[in-house]
Image (cartoon, helix red, strand yellow):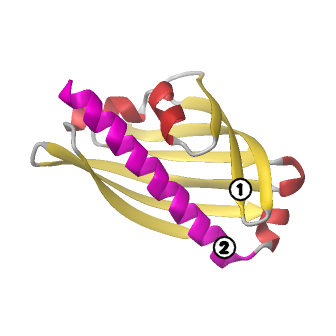
Amino acid sequence: MDMTGEFHIPAPREIVWAALNDPNILKQCIPGCNEIEKHSETELSAKVTAKVGPVKAKFGGKVTLSDVNPPNGYTITGEGAGGAAGFAKGGAKVSLEEDGEGTLLKYTAKATVGGKLAQIGSRLIDSTSKKLANEFFKKFAEIVGDDSTS
């Protein structure tokens, strides 16, 4: 599955960059995130509860940042296991561009799933992935935009 998107964040690029690297903000924005822990500048772990169609599972996984270019962007890769539900792994290239007084965040993502998740159909997985991405960026824009105005 491949996805691309862009979102206008009503905050300066440096603030958006800092927020993309703040586990507390990420935890608030990731749908179903129960826990996120930063182990180093480029390694995190997370626990997320996700529901895709009839399959609901708790995923635990690792996230790695590479090609880090502050405040312009990075590549994020991760993989998680959800027990009997299967696994998910993927990555995204995230870039930040100044856009007036705000920031334009662009991403290109690729993901693969296996186990029960792979059996429920690619259309359902694609639509759920897009929905979760939109929920993340909408919440992210709200939080970061509100923080930058105070």
| Residue 101 spot, x, y in % from top left | 11, 42
Q: Is residue 37 above or below residue 57?
A: above
Region in magenta: 121-150
The reply to whether discs 1 and 2 touch (Cβ–Cβ < 8 Å) is no
Can you tell which quarter of the image residue 102 is in?
A: top left
Q: Amino acid at mark 1?
A: Lys
Q: Residue at x 31, y 55 (%)?
A: 7
Splitting the image into 4 quarters, where does residue 59 fall? Answer: top right
Which residue is painted at 45% across and 57% down in the image? 134
Query: Dot 1 corresponds to which residue?
Result: 51
Secondary structure state at the residue bearing disc 2: helix
Q: Position of residue 142 (x, y in %)?
A: 33, 41
Under tag 1, what secondary structure? Answer: strand
Tell me the quarter of the image containing the C terminus: top left
Report crowding for label 1: few under 14, some 14 to 19, many 20 or more residues within 10 A (C-alpha): few
Mark 1 or mark 2, earlier in chain = 1
Residue 69 visible (yes or no) = no
Kindly give the residue lying farthest to the left in the view shown.
Answer: 100
Quadrant containing the N terminus in the rendered view: bottom right
Q: Which residue is mark 2?
A: 124
